[in-house]
Amino acid sequence: MRCFGFRRWRLVAWSCGLLILGGAAEAQVFGWKSERKLGFTAPPIVWAEVAERFPRLGPQVYRDPQARFVQTAGFAARKWPIAVKFELEEKGVLLLRVLGERDNEHVYFKGRKGRIRLEEWKIPRRFSKGIVPAEFLVTAYDRELPKGKPIGFTLHGLGVGKRAVGSLVIEDVTFGPSPVTAAGATPAEISLQSKTLFDSTEAHIWRQTLDPGANRIETRIIQRQELNCPRKQACRDRWDLRDDQGQPSIGNHGLSISAWFRGPPKKQHWTYVDSDDRVVVQPE
């Protein structure tokens, strides 16, 4: 997931498995005055909805190419490991926050321009007791706050919980070929390999389109496909180049993989991985 540009944050809501933009609220929860000066706002999370929806939908990732942040929601607990795979567009730091209803933990990871890094970190013991819904927020800066200024970055993957970390347990994610024509007989191939046998694994195909009225690029999940992925073996599927309404999907498309455990909260570890590949679907 590549993040670039900059816009004011807005309220995030859940809609059909996709986080979308809504109203705005001040970012006092973060406590960094420099971010308030930059125009950041806190996207409130409805904790009860996270707990209710997660077993069915897994981690829901919000992406906005105009903003320099990535947000998702899932479960978290003290001492749970987190793996982050990322790449910065210039030398700086990646900031990962874990925000609960009563928690605000964060960690910085250093990075260099164009170098992919895989880092692991454990949620501190002072985090809330038990398993709680949490927001995971990723941003990047040229230096640590409060003096840091936002920079572009790519989030390649995020894993939470020991059964979902393991140097990121989903790898070799590919999506192609490209370009293809909507009327052609060649579907797009989805391929990956998982080191863990998750309860649920889904491929999310998303499309980027330009909204001329708002002068911005919008990203929308247009197809969700459940995958049957055996452990430590290649997992393959196909996308028929159509959206969730059965219509040909024209434009630039990306692929994200979400995998999670549906059991009791203490076992609801999860991971999210983004493919670097893009599939351009052209008209006839």
Image (cartoon, rainbow, N blue to C red):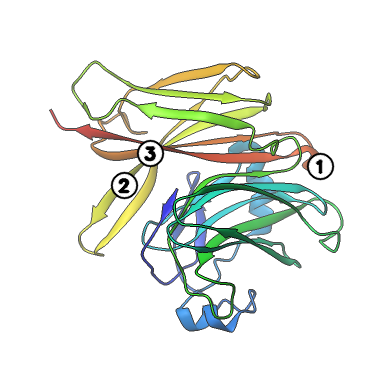
Ranked by sequence position, the earlier of labels 2 and 1 is 2
- The amino acid type found where label 2 is placed reads Gln
Q: Residues within 10 Å of mark 1 (few under 14, many from 20)?
A: some
Question: Mark 2 — residue?
Answer: 208
Residue furthest out toward the left: 284
Please name whichever residue, 55 or 238, is drawn nearer the observer in this view of the structure: 238
On the picture, is 171 further left or further right than 67? right
Image vertical order of residue 201 relative to residue 264, above or below: above
Residue 150 lies, in percent from the top left, at: 46, 70
Residue 254: assigned label: 3
Q: Are marks 2 and 1 in contact (CB under 8 Å)?
A: no
82 shown above or below 182: below
Looking at the image, do the residues carrying marks 3 and 2 touch, with CB atoms under 8 Å apart? yes
Image location (x, y in percent) of residue 9: 46, 69
What kind of element bears circle 1?
Answer: helix
Residue beneath the point at 64% across and 32% down: 169
Residue depicted at 50% across the width and 66% down the height: 11
Residue located at (24% from left, 64% from top):
215
As helix, strand or loop, the secondary structure at mark 2 comes to strand
Q: Which mark is residue 266?
A: 1
